[in-house]
Amino acid sequence: MGTTVNILKATHKAAANLLGQIESSTGQRKVDTLNTLKEALLAHVGEENRIVKEAVGKPNATESFKSSAQNFVNELDALAKKALLPFFNKYSSASLVNSPDFSKDFQGIKKALADRIAYEESNFYPELEKAGY
């Protein structure tokens, strides 16, 4: 495995750990952990976008890889804008994270993140590794 892909996978594990902490915490601690997760995910997305842009710009990048990379970025952007950011913005206070809606919404976000992580690690990261990452 490439060093870059290993780092990206380590970030996924850290995010999964934070998701577990969110489930087991309450009140302000839950809000603080949500904010930590938000910051970690945004940094991760930024790093993935930087790496993809660099990889696509390599002279040996195939059209297939470029197409796959563009889909990867578009899907990630849509997930962030349509699900993650609205969720984090909605649950920004202790009273809201203790509301009945939080659990349902959190399970949806948790599943979306788990699905995305599985996709990245099984489908796209192998392509990055082939590109030397």
Image: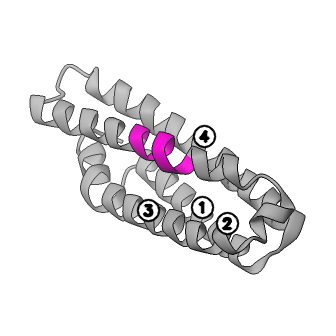
Give the residue type at disc 2.
Leu
Residue bearing the label numbered 4? 43
SS assignment at label 3: helix
Q: Earlier in the sequence, mark 3 or mark 2?
A: 2
Numbered badge on residue 15: 1
Cα–Cα gap, marks 4 and 2? 15 Å
**The image quarter in which residue 48 lies:** top left
The one of 26 and 20 positioned closer to us in this rendering:
26
The answer to if 31 sits in the magenta stretch is no
Cα–Cα gap, marks 3 and 4? 18 Å
Residue bearing the label numbered 3? 112
Identify the residue at the far bottom of this view.
Answer: 24
Count of numbered tags: 4
Q: Which residues are magenta?
A: 77-84
Classify mark 4: residues with Cα within 10 Å, few (<14), some (14-19) or many (20+): few
Residue bearing the label numbered 2? 18
Q: Earlier in the sequence, mark 1 or mark 4?
A: 1
Residues marked 3 and 4 touching at CB (< 8 Å)? no
Residues marked 1 and 2 touching at CB (< 8 Å)? yes
Taking the image as shown, residue 3 lies to the left or right of residue 15, namely left
